[in-house]
Image (tube, grey):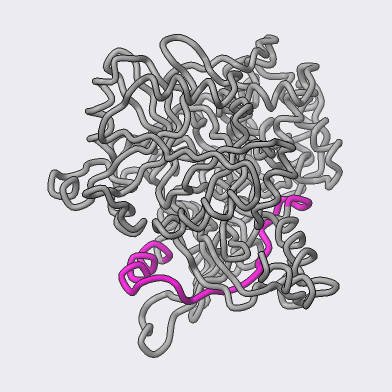
Amino acid sequence: MVDVTVESVNTQEHALILDEFLEIGTPAHATYDRPPNPDMLDFARAGAAVGGTSATLEKTRALAEYFRSLDDDDLRRAAVFMTGRPFGPSKRSTLGLGWSALSKVVGAISGRDDDELQLLFRKHSDLGDWAGEALEARTEYGDVPLDEVEKTLEAIRTARGAAKAAPLERLLRRLHPEAARFVVKIISGEMRIGLSEGLVEAAVAEAFGQPVTKVKGVHLITGDIGETAVRIKHGLIETSEVTLFQPIRFMLASPVETAAEPFGRMGAEKVWTEEKYDGVRCQLHHADGRVELFSRDLKETTSAFPELAENATRLGHAVLFDGEVLAHRDGRVLRFFELQHRLGRKQVTAELRREVPVVLVIFDLLYLDGRSLLDEPLEERRRLLEGLRVEHPFLLARLEEATSPSDLERIFADTRERGHEGLMVKDPASPYTPGRRGLAWLKLKRPLATLDVVVTAVEWGHGKRKGVLSDYTFAVNDTATSRLVNVGKAYTGLTDAEIAEMTKRFLSITVDDRGWSRMVKPEVVLEVAFDSIQHSSRHASGYALRFPRIVRIRDDKPVDEIDTLERVAELYERYFGANTAEKLSEVAET
């Protein structure tokens, strides 16, 4: 990796950076007819500087210097690209380009055989780094502006099937391998240069002289780091306004294990409770007959729930609801597995609508008739929500008040009896804080705890499960290193039908076929339960979950919201560290 600093752009520095790039394999016969503003190479140069140091301050400084050199349009593009995304959330676009198609393009340009390519991938275990080395001495060693990269990504998005490969191949053939390396990183969604979204926020703050808290506040409202960077550049730091049809981040809840904790953490004499539903989080925007729905990861999902969109036009108000979509028939909530048939579909047939009808259970109102309600207390937001008198397929979340831990235990038991997985516990005086996981919203669940994890590897099953991928190795996020670290393997909890569907999915996102096992793109999120946690030298995390079992597939949750290694360590110390027997006894009593 090239370790360079980021300075202002001039001709002399262009020559210097070319000399540095020469060290990574530029062929002697290459020509350098570079455009006046070598944009993608500048992006790669900044990325190399970030990846070339482990010091957070140096990463931030290098990226801030690069951001300051850009105009508004390129700043918007670069900020999004640096988070490993081809498009900002506000564009609601996905490439639809599989790993297989991407690897075929790189292989075709490189002229290397499959064995050599596989050895290179095993060396890097990273598509971008693999592509960079595979393409050394095989491309034109040119450069393109960032807007041309964006246009190519859009061409890939709009192309169909095999035609998606052509615009990508044209771009990669022109680029210097170092620039191509970062294009592939963007396309694959994995920068792997030790750059979290939080560090991009910090770089934006340093670049334009604003406190990072202001940047985070704007980002929580816009949900788009590119738009956030441009607003911060121009000093537009108002954070409490909502723009309909621009999804904002959802407010999050912190987990608790006992009924006493909410009162201690909130310092409140009373708390509100809502049933914790087994559905998918949903944000509904409506104004003047226009309706759009967004998922937890801010992707548009309107087409998956047409009956909600159709009925929202009759609300009579401009609104932004926060709620949960449930499969629901005859007053009864259906299994989450049934709801999964509705997810990710561009078209929902009339037959599927009859088989799996849905409702939106609304628990918050964030905007009403031109007025942002984020700063209003939950009590006022609920009063306004009840005043709308919504009708089926819209329901209001069941609300109860608790004034003591015993009240909360009773409500929890009643909720579990009704088939729900737990309780949401909320401070009625709290504002709505997008994207934040504080103490105003808590979630009380049992068993002891579950973790949201991401699958990193899969194995072929045996006996009854021969021919399907049924053993899933999973990881949590180590925030200290911005890496995924494995904490266990699960092979129980899913139905045969779910395993068959997941086998197809894992085959399509395989990045390294090792025969009996496959390394897969880390995008499948699972909720897992377990009996205990123990120290383990087998995993880089240092921990292993004992007897893990899959509770459900979390297609509604993005990878950046999985649980952390810190959370695993916290649970271990609390329940399975010193005085383990005494702590387990306390857990059983509660």
Span colored in magenta: 479-506
Image x and y of residue 153, in percent: 45, 35
Residue 222: image location, x then y, percent: 56, 23
Horizontal side, residue 466 vs residue 207: left or right: left
Q: Is residue 279 magenta?
A: no
Residue drawn at point x = 83 percent, y = 47 percent: 54
Which quadrant does the C terminus fall into?
bottom right
Instruction: Determine the image quadrant of residue 508.
Output: bottom left
Residue 101 location (% of width, % of height): 40, 53
Q: Is residue 588 above or below residue 278?
A: below
Q: Residue at x 43, y 82 (%)?
A: 461
Instruction: Name the residue nearer the viewer: 334 or 171.
Output: 334
Q: Residue at x 32, y 23 (%)?
A: 389
Q: Is 480 included in the stretch rendered in magenta?
A: yes
Task: Decide: is 519 above or below 468.
Answer: above
- For residue 260, side relative to residue 148 (left or right): right
Q: Nearer the viewer, residue 192 or 309?
A: 309
Does the rendering let one see residue 45?
A: no
Q: Residue furthest left?
A: 351
Q: Give residue 276's position: percent from left, percent from top.
A: 48, 48
Q: Quadrant of residue 126?
A: bottom right
Up/down of 7 relative to 510, above or below = above
Q: Residue furthest bottom?
A: 463
Question: Is residue 119 in view?
Answer: yes
Q: Is residue 118 left or right of residue 417?
A: right
